[in-house]
Image (cartoon, rainbow, N blue to C red):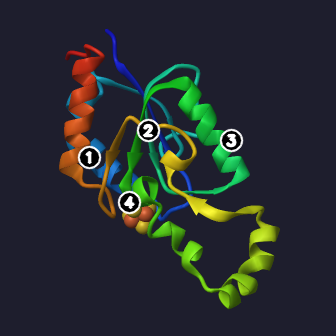
Amino acid sequence: MKKLRIGWFSFSCCEDSTIIFTELLNEHFAQWRKLLDIRAMLVLQKKEDMTSLDVAFVEGAVTSRDQSDKLKLIRNRAKKLVAIGSCACIGMPSAQRNLFNAETKAEIEAILTRFKYSEKVLKLSEVVPIDDQVPGCPMNEKIFLNILDKYLKEFKIDA
Ligand code: SF4
C-alpha cells in the first residue's frame, strides 16, 4: 500500500516541536502506521533516507553553511517542504543573536568562529522556498494536523 514518504529534520532550536510530533505519533500510531513512511527522523532512527521524500518537515533556524547546504539538499529531495515552528518560519527565537549590539556581537565572535556559525541566523525561507508553514512555539498541533491531512489527500494516500 502506498504511504506518504516523510522526513523530519531539526536545525538550530530546542526541538520542542519534535517532542510534540512524537506525542502525536503516540496518539495516532494505529492510523499513521498505515499512512506514513518515516524515512528520516533522528529521534526515532539513526539512518536517514532522503532519496525521494514526498514531504519534509523542518524545524529550527539555519545557523551555519553546513545547515544551509543540508537544507538545500532536503529541498532538492522533497516534493514539499514545511517549516515547523516559529524558529523555522520567522527565525525567532533562535535568531536572537541577530539583534545583539556591537559589543555583545564582539563577545560571541570566538564562539561563532569555533563552531563555524554564520554571521546571521536565517529562517528557512531565506535559504530555500517553502510550501507551507506551521507557526507556534512550539508548533500549533491543529495547524500541523491540517497540513498533514492536506498532503495525505494531495498525494492520494488512503488507509
Ligand atoms: S519555535 Fe519555539 S519550540 Fe520550536 S524550536 Fe524554536 S524555540 Fe523551540
**Image marks 2 and 1: residues in contact by CB distance under 8 Å:** no
Disc 3/disc 2 C-alpha distance (Å): 15 Å
- The residue singled out by tag 3 in the image is 69
Q: Amino acid at mark 1?
A: Leu
Mark 4 neighbour class, 10 Å CA radius: few under 14, some 14 to 19, many 20 or more = many
Q: Quadrant of residue 80?
A: top left
Secondary structure found at label 1: helix
Q: Quadrant of residue 20?
A: bottom left
Judged left or right of residue 87, residue 67 is right
- The residue singled out by tag 1 in the image is 24
Residue placed at 50% from the left, 55% from the top?
A: 123
- The residue singled out by tag 4 in the image is 86
Secondary structure found at label 2: loop
Query: Can I make out residue 47 in this image?
Result: no
Is disc 4's CB within 8 Å of ligand 1? Answer: yes
Residue 8 position within the rendered picture, expressed as x and y whole percent measured from the top left:
46, 40
Mark 3 vs mark 2: in front: 2
Secondary structure found at label 3: helix
